[in-house]
Each structure stands twice: as C-alpha cells, then as structure tokens.
Image (cartoon, helix red, strand yellow):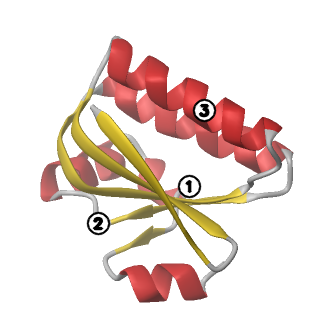
C-alpha cells in the first residue's frame, strides 16, 4: 500500500492506495500515524478512495489509530471508503465510531 501525505488548512490528509491488509501495509500505516502524532499532528483525514481491499488487520489499524489520536485530543476521520469497506465498518459496528465522509470539502469543514 502507498501512502501519500498532503495538508489542507490544519488537517493532514493521508491518501491510501492499494490493499490495507495484514503485514507490511498495516504496519507502515501504524508507524506513520505514530510518527505524525509524535510530531504534534493530530487532525487526520484518512482518504480510502483508492483502497482496493481492507481486512480485519486494516480495520484494527484504523481503530487503533483513532484511539491514539483521541488520546491526544485530536480527530481522525475517514473519507470515501469503498462500498465493501463501508459494509465492513457497518458489520463490525465501527461505523458508529468513525465519522465517514464522501466529500473532501465537507470532511475538512468538520474539523
């Protein structure tokens, strides 16, 4: 999985691309979020528009990062999850935890 970073206002947007599954992709994501938090960046928007596959490890990494961001009084929100990812969030009950947006402008305005 590739992760690109960009900033809009005070929000750091992480554009994820590829499979978000057990192994290197979820490890890399966790390491990056921990690094960003250590740098004081705590307003994160995770763009899932280009994520082709998410498994339980990917969902776990999202949840762990959400909790880590919350502990430092930040916010982590999701942008444009695929229909499959949205169903997984719903089945697991995570849809009630994450704020999920289909529009980047609306997501950015919510911070």
Marks 1 and 3 in Cβ contact (< 8 Å): no
* Residue 75 versus residue 88 in the image, above or below: below
Q: Image quadrant for the C terminus? A: bottom right
The residue at which mark 3 appears reads as 64
Residue 64 image-quadrant placement: top right
Percent of width and height locating residue 61: 49, 30
Q: Position of residue 77 (x, y in %)?
A: 53, 62
As helix, strand or loop, the secondary structure at mark 3 comes to helix
* Figure label count: 3
Disc 1 element = loop
Q: Residue at x 75, y 41 (%)?
A: 37
Mark 1 vs mark 3: in front: 3
Question: In the rendered image, which quarter is residue 53 located in?
Answer: top left
**Residue at point 47%, 31% (across, down):** 29
The residue drawn where x is 58% and y is 24% is 31
Sooner in the amino-acid sequence: mark 1 or mark 2: 2
Nearest the camera: 89 or 30? 30
Few, some or many residues within 10 Å of mark 3 (<14, 14–19, 20+): some
Question: 10 Å neighbourhood of mark 1: few (<14), some, or many (≥20)?
Answer: few
Find the distance from the CA under tag 3 to the CA under tag 2: 19 Å
Asked if residue 109 lies left or right of residue 88, the reply is right
**Residue that badge 1 annotates:** 97
> How far from the left and from the top, in percent, is residue 69?
73, 47
Instruction: Give the side of residue 25 with respect to residue 109, left or right.
Output: left
Helix, strand or loop under label 2: loop
Q: Nearer the viewer, mark 1 or mark 2?
A: 2
Which of the two discs, 3 and 2, labels the residue nearer the N terminus?
Answer: 3
Q: What residue would you read off at disc 2?
A: 80
Where residue 102 sits, quadrant-wise, is bottom left
Judged from this view, the residue extending furthest toward the top is: 23
Residues marked 3 and 2 touching at CB (< 8 Å) = no
């Amino acid at each position: 999985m590739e992760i690109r970073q960009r900033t809009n206002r005070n929000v750091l947007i992480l554009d994820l691309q590829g499979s978000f599954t057990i192994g290197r992709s979820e490890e890399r994501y966790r390491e990056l979020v921990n690094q960003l938090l250590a740098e004081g960046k705590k307003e994160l928007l995770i763009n899932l528009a280009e994520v082709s596959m998410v498994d339980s490890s990917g969902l776990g990494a999202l949840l762990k990062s959400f909790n880590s961001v919350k502990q430092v009084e930040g916010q982590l929100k999701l942008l444009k999850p695929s229909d499959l990812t949205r169903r997984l969030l719903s089945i697991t009950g995570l849809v009630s935890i994450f704020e999920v947006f289909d529009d980047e402008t609306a997501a950015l305005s919510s911070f």
